Image (cartoon, rainbow, N blue to C red):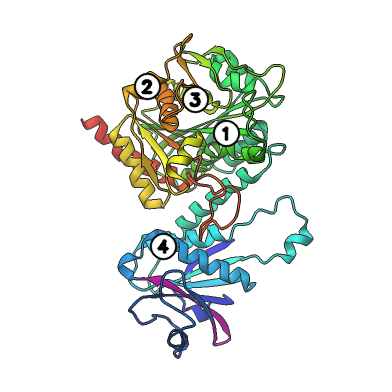
Amino acid sequence: MEVRATNAAPLETIADTIVVGAFVGEPVAHDLPGEPFELLLRSGEAGQETGRVALIHAEGRRCVLVGLGRREEFTAQRARDAAGLSVAKAIELRAQAICWEVPHHVDETIVAALVEGCVLRSYRFDRYKRASDTARSPQLSSVVMSAHHDIEAIVERAAVLATAQNRVRDLGNRPANDLTPAALAEYAHELAGERAGLEVIVMDEDMIRDTGMGGFAAVAQGSDQPARLIRLDYNGTPDGPLLALVGKAVTFDTGGLWLKPKNDMHTMKFDMLGGAAVLEAMATLSDLQAPVRAMGVIGATENMISGGATRPGDIVTALDGTTIEINNTDAEGRLVLGDLITYSRRTGAAGIVDIATLTGGVVIALGSVYAGLMSNDDGMAALMQRAGQHTGELVWRLPLHEAYAEMIKGRYAQITNLTERREAQPITAAEFLHHFAGDVPWAHVDIAGTGDNVRSAVIADKGATGFGLRLLVEAALGWPRVAAAMQAV
């Protein structure tokens, strides 16, 4: 999709559909002649309340009026939703190009959010459909943002972020027979090959095992598809503090011998969404030429059933020498992430953020509105919370505590991936990861409830949401300031 900014009036653009927003209690500010919108409002067909959408024709163009609610309550998320509603209406009308007349007197975050909402709502996944089928489906090809002042840089940046989020959705929606661990590694090479500032290193399963990543290798050993450790390096500030973004990419998760229910099995291709978010976040940092130093570490594997699969009760040794009882083969993500966190520490990370579809418990606790956040450092937690507020990808901090850490102690090994009590599942999973993070400032983001099949005005379809991409990029951009404050203490 083409996204661009202009200072031209909407009628001077090539758009076949013009979108105007209306705040409650204010006249409709627009550059169209006459009073078409005022007449529409007086008739009651349109409204200025949040979520109202109406259509009128003026000057030979389709014009969509979107209610924005009260100005003082108009947040970036409401802007995304309004943009999403406008695109849904435009697609219904089979529009090819829309022009949003940016509301007067709004700040840069609103402009960016309008762009993000348009790009995210226009997403569709048709990789496996015939060209003849997709040709009959309406698709938006162009979005123009019209304003009286210069918004080009804001629009361009927002388009980069939203487009990257859609790429995360593409990865998540691909089936496991197509997106294998090796295929994900190949895609990482493609991204790096297109970006001068991005480098990639891939370890195969033999190297993973030989390096001593016993937790990661145990998850991988039941599959015929070899695992991959994918590392991406971006040095926007070569001497800056290194931030590691760590992602779980289980490209299909049967649950192993702890088999998942059959009704949900087909959705287990989404268990790689954390890794996809990290992969595209690293590419986005390069695209934005961000002044940060970051490393993406992704553990790509399947969790399958075979004669060689890990058994409940097996004991393995992690990269840092910790022995682990694998009493639940469906709690595999923490085994992968534990080794990746140790790898990140050994590579010199001054801070670590991991992201994963990790526990069903976080879905019960927080639903699909907030992702779970757990951290061993208040500064790191605050960084993630600010990033969530800025991007609309919200996180809610849950506590760590020595009593929860006690719950992951093993009966026959040092720790276990299945606690004897079922309570506090997201937190005990985080305490498992905390064991490997140690004192390095670290945050864990559990996106099991936000990563897929979330319906909203912006993400209005089943499938991957791409949640975490904008969160990670925003956190990485704020990391140097937080790292400097940590060093000053």
N-terminal label among 2 and 1:
1
In the image, the segment drawn in magenta is 56-69
Residue 75 place in picture, x, y as percent: 36, 61
Disc 3 element = helix
Q: Which residue is mark 3?
A: 340
Q: Residues under labels 2 and 3: Cα distance? A: 20 Å
N-terminal label among 1 and 4:
4
Kindly identify the amino acid type of the residue bearing the numbered disc 2.
Ala
Instruction: State which quadrant residue 97 falls in.
Output: bottom right
Q: Do callouts 3 and 4 mark residues in contact (Cβ within 8 Å)?
A: no
Quarter holding the N terminus is: bottom right
Q: Do callouts 2 and 3 mark residues in contact (Cβ within 8 Å)?
A: no
Kindly identify the amino acid type of the residue bearing the numbered disc 3.
Leu
Q: Residues under labels 1 and 3: Cα distance? A: 12 Å
Task: Look at 33% across and 22% down and name the residue there.
Answer: 403
Q: Residues under labels 4 and 2: Cα distance? A: 39 Å
Foreground residue among 86 and 286: 86
Foreground residue among 197 and 43: 43
Q: Which residue is mark 4?
A: 78
Q: Which residue is mark 1?
A: 249
In the image, which is nearer the foreground, mark 4 or mark 2?
A: 2
